[in-house]
Image (cartoon, rainbow, N blue to C red):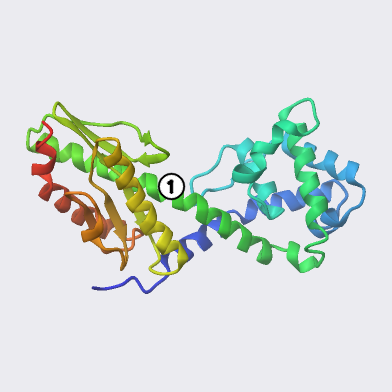
Amino acid sequence: MAFAVENIRLKELAIVAEQNRPAFQDFVAFLRSEGFETLHSFVMSEDDDRAKATLLRYLLRPLPQGISLYDGIARPYAPEKAKWLLLGWVFRDAPEQRLRPMISSMPGNNANQKKADLINQIRIYIRSIFPEPTRWEWTAISEVFIDRLEGSRRAIKGTLFEAIVRRQLDALFKARHVGLKISDTEIKLGGETYDVSVIGKGGQILIPVKTRETMGGGHALLFTRDIHKSISVAHDAGYECLPIIIAESWAGDLAALSCKEQIYINKNPNQVLEVEPILADELEKRLPTFQSIM
């Protein structure tokens, strides 16, 4: 078994983070135009009303032509979302996961005013945590960008393999003249999400697609627990479950999975070109299982 020794994920994230440097520099240039010599001086400003007004003007200002903020696989965000995300990242917070639910409770007559007030409160709070000027230079900020992009990339990668499974099943069923329907969307059941499902007159097979890039640590245990839980919830609801697990050197016990069939591919999910043909072959081997619900 040839492991992917190189940290492909980190290399790709570093490249995307560097692509986001112009958006960061544009924000710093905007602050200079507002009379703040550096990002650090803006962060440390005690004129909180002025700082909030500056943040609001940034949110209202269109991004200059050619400036974009990119997600974990280098796709540009919409400009309005880009500005919101950039501010959240610069001030070391999670704009979508943690801050967005707070927006509606902030003072202001519209969404941008509420966002400006919230980000300004974050700025006030964090200036005492990171008072050093070096914390507000690109070298330090880029590390934050990489962390945030990793979360974005992880979600996108999961969706990527979900799409690959759908495409490969569709090609397999057409080639073998199998009259089964493949779901277009995820299915939520008992708090669990099943990325793909196959529906026939004789039943329905739920297919959770689980990917993991790294091999060990506490998160690996959570990954294994997540797999077992998704299978258990499906079975309790009366469904067959065929999990697809793409993870390098996963230490889970396949025999312990309470399902008739499962697919485990011992590869780093970043190796998409290598994984795809293996996945297609494994799905074809499970054709009798799919035909059993026709």
Which image quadrant is residue 112 in? top right
Identify which residue is drawn at 33% across, 63% down. 268
Image position, residue 179 (x, y; %): 12, 29
Q: Is residue 116 left or right of residue 193?
A: right
| Tally of numbered tags | 1
In depth, the one of 137 and 230 nearer the eye is 230
Q: Is residue 274 left or right of residue 139?
A: left
Which image quadrant is residue 246 in? bottom left
Q: Is residue 141 left or right of residue 207?
A: right
In depth, the one of 14 and 200 nearer the eye is 200
Image position, residue 139 (x, y; %): 66, 66
Q: Is residue 243 left or right of residue 90?
A: left
Identify which residue is drawn at 55% across, 41% down. 77
User: For the residue marked with disc 1, what is the amino acid?
Assistant: Ile
Q: Is residue 63 above or below residue 6?
A: above
Q: Is residue 280 above or below residue 107?
A: below
Image position, residue 168 (x, y; %): 21, 43
Identify which residue is drawn at 64% across, 36% down. 80
Q: Which residue corresponds to mark 1?
A: 156
Identify which residue is drawn at 29% across, 35% down. 237
| Res 269 visible | yes
* Quadrant in the picture for the C terminus: top left
Which image quadrant is residue 292 in? top left
Task: Pick out the residue farthest to the front.
Answer: 236
Crowding around mark 1 (Cα neighbors within 10 Å: few <14, some 14 to 19, many 20+) is some
SS type, badge 1: helix
* Quadrant in the picture for the N terminus: bottom left
Image position, residue 258 (x, y; %): 23, 51
| Res 66 visible | no
